Amino acid sequence: MRQSLRIGIFGTSGMAREAGDIAFACGLEPVYVARDEVELNAWKYHHKVILEKNVTQYTGVPFVIGVGENKIRKAIAERFKNILKFTNLIHPSATFGYQQREEIQQSEGVIVAAGVRLTSSISVGDFCIFNQNVTVAHDSVVENYVHIAPGANISGNIHLKAGCWVGAGAVINQGGNTNKLIIGENTIVGSGAVVIKNCESDAVYVGVPAKRIK
Ligand SMILES: CC(C)(COP(=O)(O)OP(=O)(O)OC[C@H]1O[C@@H](n2cnc3c(N)ncnc32)[C@H](O)[C@@H]1OP(=O)(O)O)[C@@H](O)C(=O)NCCC(=O)NCCS
């Protein structure tokens, strides 16, 4: 396999292997990165895995971070941002509105899984994860290190602040043209929640309609 057809994927968990699936769908050969010997020794798949401390031997390879936890993904990105080249990894079945794919290409480290749909005029930060079958509608803003879990639907005019996490199957109702609905920094929206108004930062919201529980 030629070096140029490889992609490095930080992590060895389920999220990393799902990123690996996207890589395969793109015709790329994943090289997984284990944090330590324990993770390396626990690896039971036949794909190549290397230790994080040896990652600089792969500076010619583009990387993504296949870690769902936003804070860990951020820590890895910051540790290696001046050392490695991060790329975007976009499943071929993802679909995009007008110039939306080009917009994502301005960012780095973004993972877009199978079945995702981003429509129109959406701004996307670095190291975001759009998990399987997520939809994001018009005029939304997705800041750095956001993770949107499988099947969540983000309506139009939503602002997802840095590090927030939207659970599987959650729905965020639309915001207004001049006052987007805001999900605060590092906030978690639980699976299946329906968010109808702004969510504060560093909080946890669940239920229909979503209420703050932490
Ligand atoms: C919201 C969430 C983060 C809360 O986790 P937690 O902080 O560990 O909270 P707990 O499990 O202690 O639950 C606290 C309360 O919220 C309730 N609750 C938890 N998750 C809920 C959800 N998704 N919807 C409704 N209620 C929920 C619990 O029943 C519990 O209620 P109680 O105090 O009346 O017993 C978690 O339950 C969740 O929904 N995670 C998302 C899972 C997901 O989308 N995974 C996709 C992986 S890619």
Image: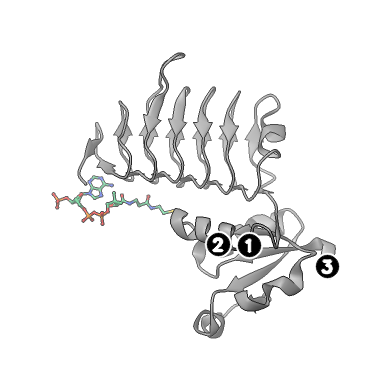
Q: Cα distance, mark 2 to mark 1?
A: 6 Å
Residue 76, labelled with which disc? 2
Depth check, front residue: 120 or 91: 120
- Residue shown at the point (52%, 42%) measured from the top left: 133
Mark 2 surroundings within 10 Å by alpha-carbon count, few (fewer than 14), some (14 through 19), many (20 or more): few
Q: Is residue 124 left or right of residue 85?
A: left
Q: Residue 28: percent from the left, percent from the top?
A: 75, 60
Mark 3 surroundings within 10 Å by alpha-carbon count, few (fewer than 14), some (14 through 19), many (20 or more): few
Depth check, front residue: 183 or 152: 183
Marks 2 and 1 in Cβ contact (< 8 Å): yes
Q: Is residue 214 left or right of residue 51?
A: left
Question: In this view, which residue lies farthest toward the front?
Answer: 82
Q: Is residue 100 above or below residue 129?
A: above
Q: Is residue 39 above or below residue 98?
A: below
Q: Earlier in the sequence, mark 2 or mark 3?
A: 3
Residue 3, labelled with which disc? 3
Q: Residue 12: percent from the left, percent from the top?
A: 55, 70
Q: Residue 70: percent from the left, percent from the top?
A: 46, 53
Residue depth check, mark 3 versus mark 1: number of the one nearer the observer: 1
Residue 22, labelled with which disc? none
Can the viewer see residue 43? yes
Marks 2 and 3 in Cβ contact (< 8 Å): no
Q: Quadrant of the N terminus?
A: bottom right
- Residue shown at the point (72%, 33%) measured from the top left: 102
Q: Please state which amino acid type lies under the numbered disc 2.
A: Ile
State the SS at label 3.
helix
Q: Which residue is mark 1?
A: 80
Q: Is residue 132 left or right of residue 28?
A: left
Q: Please state which amino acid type lies under the numbered disc 1.
A: Phe
Question: In this view, which residue lies farthest toward the top?
Answer: 178
